[in-house]
Image (cartoon, grey):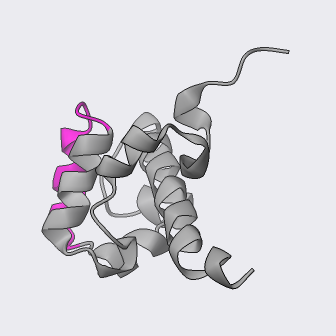
Amino acid sequence: MKAPNPAEMPQKLLPSHQESLWPGDPFDWSVEQVSAFISLHDPAATKIASALRREEIDGPAFLLLTQANCSRGLNLTQVEIAKLCHIVEAAKTKFAQLHIEPYL
């Protein structure tokens, strides 16, 4: 069994210093905050951030992104789509921590 890759771990399992990457509630993010978050999460993802900004993807739309709808219209490679989907899943985990876990 191989050792876990920290980049593949759910956000709540990452060290607390990673919290600084989360500018509040993902549901409330503007188009610019989504773009900035992508750039902070992966500095090499400038093409992804630009595509989301061009399509005016804000926080609620960002949380709804799937591999299928990223494949249409964003003009990204499969590798970029995979990176984006990983970042979206991390944001969904953060959203769940903020809105669901307090009630469990």
Instruction: State whether residue 97 is above or below residue 12.
Output: below
For the residue pair 44 and 22, the one nearer the viewer reads as: 22
- Quick check: 51 left or right of 62? left
User: x%, y% of residue 98?
Assistant: 51, 74
Q: Report the predominant secondary structure element of the magenta stretch.
A: helix
Q: Can the viewer see residue 73?
A: yes
- Quick check: 1 left or right of 49? right
Q: Quadrant of residue 102?
A: bottom right
Instruction: Name the residue at 33% across, 57% down.
Output: 22
Instruction: State whether residue 86 is above or below residue 95.
Output: above
Question: Is 16 within the magenta?
Answer: no
Q: Quadrant of residue 55?
A: bottom left
For the residue pair 33 and 54, the one nearer the viewer reads as: 33
User: x%, y% of residue 42?
Assistant: 31, 36
Q: Which residues are magenta?
A: 42-56
Q: Quadrant of residue 52?
A: bottom left
User: x%, y% of residue 77?
Assistant: 38, 39
Instruction: Name the residue at 38% across, 69% down.
Output: 62
Question: Is 52 within the magenta?
Answer: yes
Q: Can the viewer see residue 68?
A: no
Furthest residue to the right?
1
| Quarter of the image that includes the N terminus | top right
Furthest residue to the bottom?
103
How many numbered circles are shown?
Answer: 0
For the residue pair 15 and 43, the one nearer the viewer reads as: 15
